[in-house]
Image (cartoon, rainbow, N blue to C red):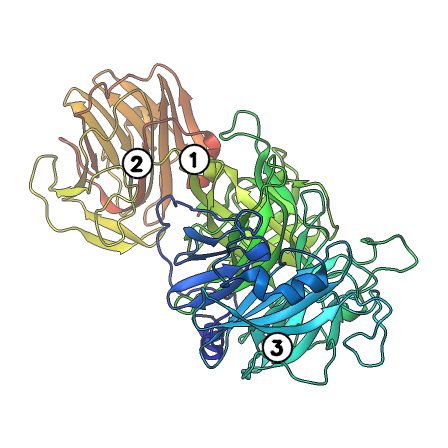
Amino acid sequence: MKATRRAALAACAAGILALTTLIHPASAVEKPPAPGFRDVTVHDPSVVTSGSHIWVFGSHGASAHTQDLLNWTQHTVDLSQNSNNTLFTNLRTELKEALDWAETDTLWASDVIQLPNGKFAMYYNACKGDSPRSALGLAIADTVDGPYKDQGILLKSGMWDEESENPGEIYDALIHPNAVDPDAFYDEDGTLWMVYGSYSGGIFIVKMDSATGKPVSGQGYGTHLMGGNHSRIEAPAIQYNKDTGYYYLYTSFGGLDATGGYNMRVARSKNPNGPYVDAKGTVMSTVKSNPSRPLFDDASIAPHGVKLMGSHVFTRESGSPGSGSGVGYVSPGHNSWYQDPKTGKMFLIFHSRFPDTGEMHQMRVQQMWFNKDGWPVLSPMRYAGETTERTVSEHVVGTWQLINHGTDINTTATKSSTYTFRSGGTITSGTGTTSVGSWRITSRNTADITLAGTTYNGVYTPVFDPQYNSWSYGFTALSSTGTALMGRNISLAARSASTPDGAWSFEGNLNDASGQSATATTTGNRLGTAGTAPTYTTGIHGRAIQLNGSNGVVLPQGLIHGNRYTVSMWIKPEQLTEHTPAFFGAASTEQWVSLVPRGNAAAQGNAMVWSGTQWYDAPTTTSPPLNQWTHLAYVVNNGTAQVFVNGSRAYNGTGFPNVFTSTNATFALGVNYWDTPFSGAIDEVKVWRTALTASDISALAAR
């Protein structure tokens, strides 16, 4: 986060938990509604804050700002689109010395930070492009949006056959830096530094004078951190994390265009000026191209650094929503970082291209956490306002698409592979039944995924899936050697795309959680009698409604209408009596459907669904145990009826009557017009006016 020194240090401390688990906000909240986005184009974004606004500055004079990281406002555009850039009174006149030196008419990746005196320092840079002839300078403004006043060039590069910034050394592009891509930051003690560099001799760092914003004299190009011999490494940014005690050096490997293989990597150090190492312990100052190989030798650098994200696509399967090849990023990179000082949430902000769209690029924001080994992991989907919450098995069980980012500088997008995360913690490939790994939820939302013998640690998180236009779940994790694995639950995304038409979780109230239905009410021991205030108890997830054998819950009228619907619920009975309903629906006293934990003699006292007076029995072979949670569900699909107990199909039949032909049917939990009311707890009641699949029900039944 680029703010005042005080704000930068405060942000590192705010809201972060000790790394005995994972770093995330402490409280869970319900998922927000479907987000809206307003996107901007800022290539190579760098972050700074001013008041409640978060600003980004990038290449070619572009800038933008936001207050929520979702809806951005473009402030200035690319100089090629509008040369009258308002960040300067007259940019090309004021920065003429730098532009002339670099033999160009545009700027590369600018960086802005607020100095302790309250003024804003812009580190601008210009580069010839086909050579490392560059100038890096400083401009100062009273306000973040300028106008900035030039303070002169700080560093130059590309002075062929002339003395470099290192006294007595002739400039050599194999070992000396290209003076571009600056990132200024404060260390834990409030000392100002600037890291910079692109290709050429690699990434360098210099100590700065925070009073002037200029380098402390006598450093030349500073200390070498990484790269050299024209290795394709650039765009450094450094974050200090107070809780891990490490400085994190983010860089981008590869080329920035759609086929260049741009990808974001990280290394860490206990000191701002290194040495930085990756998860394997490789000292990054030794990572550089082999000069005996052809120019831009990627093979020598690709195995090193922790690759957080490269080009990838979660593929769109035939018949699934959306268009094109799928969702993902192409050549994501040149990231900065931001931490919300109030919530402690952390983010990477970067530019990216996208599948099927060529060179079109926009800025994106991805939420970030640190795993138990102290390495950052990135959400598999863009930030949509989500907050991590307590993860339960229902979030995880289902069909997943996984991306293994590997270590290569991949110039084509890595395509997702399909796996099934099964109840009980096993993972199978595709729809197969042979275990290839395992999954666990440890702590609150910690993900431990083992696949093909490799264990990955990270987080489970709510995600908004743009293909399905729905909230779902994902995970992001790293292996001990720094390989990133991330995934999305497409079963949950597809099911979420069909929002329940009613959902009652009984978290101390009778409110509908789906946003599609009304609040429930109470009734006495029969429908139509006066009810009392509800009471609540510990539920399968959170709280549950407690029924005492003399009361019930009335759900909204017309909840189900039609001949395709699904009912899902958890029950914990304290006693079982014949015909007592858990869920009851009636078009009239002559047309009704009842889900009962103990059925009639035909069901031998087991759970069943039955209907009258068009009599239909759908018995199971299971009787829910007393004082234990059991998941019950039934699905009606145009005359086909299925009943499920704990996620397993226990009945499948045809000829089920069409009962709910109007929109005025009555629905209740625990009571009907005639029988003994239910005694026990009920939780997580969900109703769809569509027929869910057996795999959907299995996921709903996961604990």
| Distance in Å between CA atoms under marks 1 and 2 | 26 Å
Q: Which residue is mark 3?
A: 193
The image position of residue 359, as x and y in percent, is: 63, 41
Q: Nearer the viewer, residue 351 or 664?
A: 351
| Mark 2 Cα shell of 10 Å, populated few (<14), some (14-19), many (≥20) | many
Which is nearer the N-term, disc 1 or disc 2? 1
Q: Is residue 703 visible?
A: yes
| Mark 3 Cα shell of 10 Å, populated few (<14), some (14-19), many (≥20) | many
Q: Is residue 266 visible?
A: no
Instruction: Determine the residue positioned at 31% across, 32% down.
Output: 605
Number of disc labels = 3
| Distance in Å between CA atoms under marks 1 and 3 | 49 Å
| Mark 1 Cα shell of 10 Å, populated few (<14), some (14-19), many (≥20) | some
Q: Nearer the viewer, residue 213 or 257?
A: 213
The amino acid type, in three-letter code, at marker 1 is Arg
Q: Which residue is mark 2?
A: 597
